[in-house]
Image (tube, coloured by chain):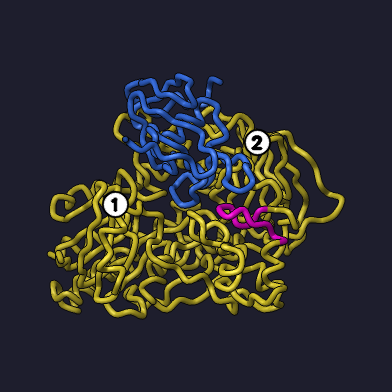
Chain colours: A blue, B yellow
């Protein structure tokens, strides 16, 4: 989906590729993961623990904890408070998510 | 343990202003904030990577913020400022715990200034948990400092002038606003002119925003409210209705609008977690957003040595927050012996004068925008009220019918408020719901007792604080 990124007023940072649920998506330096996901047309950030309901970005300032995603293997990360990095892996979180433990 | 003369929490307008005055007076200050850059919500700055080309498209707060932030930059090297720091608890003997760069820290402060700000007032209504429903503040941050539109066809629902500002920003960014719903009575808007007489900057903002909306052809519907968001897994339509003076929907006036995004803006709730953990006395002031700390004229709370300023002491916006912050910073500097009482008073005088001027306007704005009772009656039996624990209105009501009389009892029976947001999203509504069920005013319902950590903290970092938590 095109056109979510606003073209006037500012110039964006370096473009980079990130991975959202296995799909390659373009993001820009300085964007939060939440902004990059929304810009790519993403709505559902996670599904809830008890009822499996979809939830999306809500408060945008790190208070509501609705935008929790699994980012680079770390579950329950607030997408609105996390800046993108080149190649970062972003996954829609199911319930509490799974922590990748190094063996 | 490291000793800090003055600890300031928050780098929004109030925290920055407090830091500027305290540092100028010679105080050694530590300043903590969760964000990447100073500025808070209103004066939020772009992250590294973005480059501003045309300030005019960025709204009217941008140049104002720039002046305050430039003042802050000029003293920044003289204080210990830690960004992306999460202050998570205040403990006896002036101990404050925070996490910074993946490590747990604990310091002892002599004086503390809490400038924690506020967040959008959450209002439960059917469908409000669907992806595509944003808070107005969240949408504004996304458009303003990330330069991303929250959706394709956007409905703004709520009250007050901030909705107008958001609509202008969306339109200037090339987005589409389907309509603006104003729950309040715009008939009283001319009173703004009386209240705002002399506050030309704010009045000119209002006129500027209204003209922008008219030019863009956005319908502004008065006395209307959103009653439901519908869609399969995401917002597809909004049901709106006319309301009476109590903001109760008038039966038979419902209409359906096809939209993919809904922004909810019913004002703000002060962030009082820290002042409550510190056992400061609070009072309930519906006109100022709910529970707020009781303060002296110099922004000191009921706990000696703890000050609070800005929106966390009552919603009044950034212009008031700056002046309150300056007063708090000067009061702390005086109590630490850096300036004489006379000198402190002299330096506080301009801020006091500006606050008096803003007071009248504030009163009128508050009266127009204060939530009315109908707002908290929108949730139906099966509407999720506590978003984290996925509790419905029915489940909350059952707890009350089974004997729960205050918020802490409902919490123990249902887990309400025990999820990640720690009651920030459900608290204000559930207080109203209990009050209604019991037939008493909301301030008679004891509020949730906040516990450290005030926001979720990795367990490993918490474990480093074992000694502290044992006390």
Whether residue B261 appears in this view of the structure is yes
Q: Earlier in the sequence, mark 1 or mark 2?
A: 1
Judge from the rendering whether residue B152 lies leftward or rightward of residue B56; answer left or right: right
Identify the image quadrant of the C terminus of chain B.
Answer: bottom left
Q: Which mark is residue B234?
A: 2
Does label 2 lie on the same chain as label 1?
Answer: yes
Q: Is residue B208 visible?
A: no
Task: In the rendered view, tell whether residue B221 sits above or below residue B351.
Answer: above
Residue B271 position, x and y percent, is 44, 62
In terms of depth relative to the viewer, which is nearer, B243 or B349? Answer: B243
Residue A24 among magenta residues: no
Residue shown at the point (61%, 74%) measured from the top left = B442
Quadrant containing the N terminus of chain B in the rendered view:
bottom left
Residue at point 77% right, 49% down? B241
Disc number for residue B85? 1
| Image-quadrant location for residue B414 | bottom right
Image point (62%, 53%), residue name: B390
Q: Residue at x 21, y 69 (%)?
A: B109
Output the chain of dot 2. B
Which region is colored magenta? B384-394
Could you tell me which secondary element the residue under label 2 belongs to? loop
Name the foreground residue: A25 vs B463: B463
Q: Position of residue A77 (x, y in %)?
A: 42, 42
**Residue A100 position (above or below residue B347):** above
Query: How many numbered marks have been drawn onto this rendered protein structure?
Result: 2
Q: Is residue B385 magenta?
A: yes
Tell me residue B153's x, y (percent).
64, 31
Q: Identify which residue, B25 or B427, lies in the foreground.
A: B427
**Percent of width and height locating residue B382:** 73, 54
Instruction: State which chain disc 1 sits on.
Output: B
Measure the alpha-carbon separation of dots 1 and 2: 34 Å
């Amino acid at each position: 989906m095109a056109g979510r990124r606003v073209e006037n007023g500012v110039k964006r940072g370096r473009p980079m590729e990130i991975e959202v649920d296995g799909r390659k998506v373009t993001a820009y330096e300085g964007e939060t993961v939440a902004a990059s996901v929304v810009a790519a047309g993403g709505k559902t950030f996670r599904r809830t623990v008890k009822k499996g309901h979809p939830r999306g970005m809500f408060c945008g300032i790190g208070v509501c904890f609705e935008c929790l995603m699994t980012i680079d293997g770390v579950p329950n990360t607030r997408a609105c408070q996390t800046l993108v990095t080149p190649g970062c892996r972003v996954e829609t979180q199911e319930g509490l998510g799974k922590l990748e433990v190094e063996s | 343990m490291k000793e800090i003369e003055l600890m300031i929490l928050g780098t929004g307008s109030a925290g920055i202003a407090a830091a500027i005055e305290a540092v100028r007076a010679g105080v050694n200050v530590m300043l903590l904030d969760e964000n990447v850059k100073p500025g808070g919500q209103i004066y939020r700055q772009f992250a590294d990577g973005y480059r501003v080309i045309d300030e005019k498209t960025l709204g009217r707060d941008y140049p104002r913020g720039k002046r305050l932030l430039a003042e802050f930059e000029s003293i920044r090297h003289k204080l210990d400022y830690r960004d992306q720091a999460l202050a998570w608890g205040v403990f006896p003997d002036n101990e404050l715990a925070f996490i910074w760069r993946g490590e747990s820290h604990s310091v002892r402060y002599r004086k503390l200034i809490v400038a924690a700000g506020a967040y959008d007032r959450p209002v439960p209504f059917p469908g409000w948990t669907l992806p595509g429903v944003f808070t107005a503040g969240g949408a504004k941050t996304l458009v303003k400092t990330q330069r991303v539109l929250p959706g394709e066809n956007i409905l703004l629902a709520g009250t007050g002038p901030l909705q107008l500002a958001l609509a202008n920003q969306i339109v200037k960014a090339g987005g589409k606003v389907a309509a603006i719903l104003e729950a309040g009575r715009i008939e009283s808007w001319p009173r703004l002119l009386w209240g705002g007489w002399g506050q030309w900057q704010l009045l000119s903002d209002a006129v500027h925003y209204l003209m922008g909306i008219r030019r863009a052809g956005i319908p502004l519907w008065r006395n209307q409210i959103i009653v439901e968001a519908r869609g399969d897994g995401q917002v597809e339509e909004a049901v709106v209705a006319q309301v009476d003076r109590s903001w109760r929907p008038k039966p038979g006036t419902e209409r359906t609008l096809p939209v993919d995004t809904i922004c909810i803006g019913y004002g703000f709730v002060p962030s009082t977690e820290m002042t409550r953990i510190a056992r400061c006395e609070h009072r309930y002031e519906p006109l100022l957003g709910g529970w707020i700390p009781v303060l002296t004229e110099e922004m000191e709370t009921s706990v000696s040595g703890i000050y609070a300023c800005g929106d966390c002491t009552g919603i009044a916006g950034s212009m008031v927050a700056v002046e309150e912050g300056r007063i708090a910073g000067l009061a702390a500097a005086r109590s630490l012996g850096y300036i004489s009482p006379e000198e402190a008073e002299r330096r506080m005088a301009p801020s006091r004068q500006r606050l008096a001027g803003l007071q009248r306007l504030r009163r009128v704005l508050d009266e127009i925008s204060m939530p009315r009772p109908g707002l908290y009656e929108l949730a139906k039996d099966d509407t999720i009220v506590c978003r984290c624990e996925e509790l419905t209105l029915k489940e909350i009501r059952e707890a009350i019918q089974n004997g729960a009389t205050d918020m802490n009892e409902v919490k123990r029976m249902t887990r309400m408020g025990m999820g990640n947001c720690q009651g920030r999203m459900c608290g204000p509504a559930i207080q109203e719901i209990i009050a209604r069920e019991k037939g008493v005013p909301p301030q008679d319902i004891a509020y949730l007792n906040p516990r450290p950590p005030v926001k979720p903290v990795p367990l490993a970092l918490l474990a480093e604080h074992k000694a502290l938590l044992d006390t």
